Image (cartoon, grey):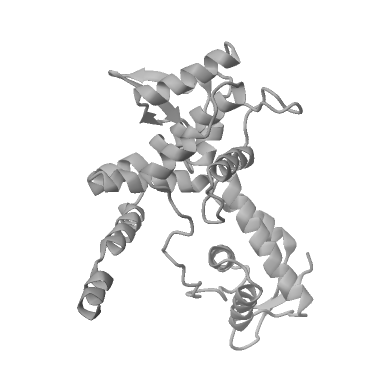
Amino acid sequence: MESLQVVNDTTEITTKQTLKADFLESFLRYLDATPKTVETYTRALRQLFSYFSFNGITQPGREDIIAFREELKASGHKPTTTQNYITAARLFFGWTSQEGLYPNIAEHLKGVKLDREHKRDYLTSRQVKEMLETIEKDSLKGLRDYALLVLMITGGLRTIEAARADIGDLRNNGDNTVLYIQGKGRTEKTDYIKLSPQVEKALRAYLTARGSGADADPLFTSTSNNNAGERLTTRSISGIVKERLKAAGYDSSRLTAHSLRHTAITLSLLAGKDITEVQQFARHANITTTMIYNHALDKAKNTCSEAIANTIF
């Protein structure tokens, strides 16, 4: 990473400083974040430094950060990606200013407007039944896929939560069989989901066919020749879900593994469950996230178009 000449005062060049590569390493060590977040910020900041270098910018100012943001948008980056990059820049330059290393040229810099509408569709209860009925349960793969899908749909599991699940996470809590999970951003399996008798039966049938395993063994494993018995990855889980969706006739770019989670939350709301209960079920840290689902359903129930049509026709 090339050194960049910067100044203490962004409006009048006074004492020059050098933005060194080791500033970035020091910032990343300073961060109190998950490895994935650190990876995201590292990638974003390295791209920012590359942008400065490519454009011959030796004394970057606020206008250069804005130009970087606009280039990200123009080059087709997703709004969420652009937002992450700008967030990384704000944090980095806030830190350099705090440490007296470099002026905060990204202070109060606006990000991009994010669309709060869901990018993925959900399945109706009828479509869920049709998809599950296409899975033949006369093989280990079929038993696994059926158990995986019913678990994700009824529990609203994310792919990472399903991938992290171990056999020993199946436990009893009160009069319920539950699955302890390591949720998004968590480091331990402190939360759990309740299993209906039908889901527990599907899981037990799969595990019985697979053979006995230790508590630390993965709940879901590969059946392929290359890595049979190894833990399923989030990518492989996404592939399994996509395969089963296509087999049921639901081949759409808007239907993915995450659609199963959307389905679980949406069907909960359609069943009349209270918004706070659904928030707890979905493990949303903020109820605002749950309200997005509620808003989408309210919009779907809006009958204004039908009323207008009735007056015209």
Q: Residue furthest top?
A: 212
- Rendered view: 15 above or below 178: below
User: Which quadrant, please, contains the N terminus?
Assistant: bottom right
The one nearer the camera, 196 or 170, is: 196
The one nearer the camera, 56 or 246, is: 246
- Residue 279, horizontal then vertical, whole percent: 31, 46
- Rendered view: 98 above or below 168: below
* Number of marks in the rendered image: 0
Residue at x 61%, y 57% (from the top left corner): 41
Residue at x 33%, y 45% (from the top left corner): 267
Q: In which image quadrant can residue 209 be found?
A: top right
160 relative to 55 in the view: left or right: left
The one nearer the camera, 256 or 7, is: 256
Q: In which image quadrant can residue 126 be found?
A: top left
Q: Residue furthest bottom?
A: 12
- Residue 289, horizontal then vertical, whole percent: 36, 54
- Residue 110, horizontal then vertical, whole percent: 49, 75
Q: In which image quadrant can residue 213 be found?
A: top right
The one nearer the camera, 132 or 294, is: 132
- Rendered view: 180 above or below 156: above
Residue at x 22%, y 45% (from the top left corner): 274
134 relative to 173 in the view: left or right: right
279 relative to 208 in the view: left or right: left
User: Which quadrant, please, contains the C terminus?
Assistant: bottom left
- Residue 98, horizontal then vertical, whole percent: 54, 65
Residue 283 visible in image:
no
Residue 300 visible in image:
yes
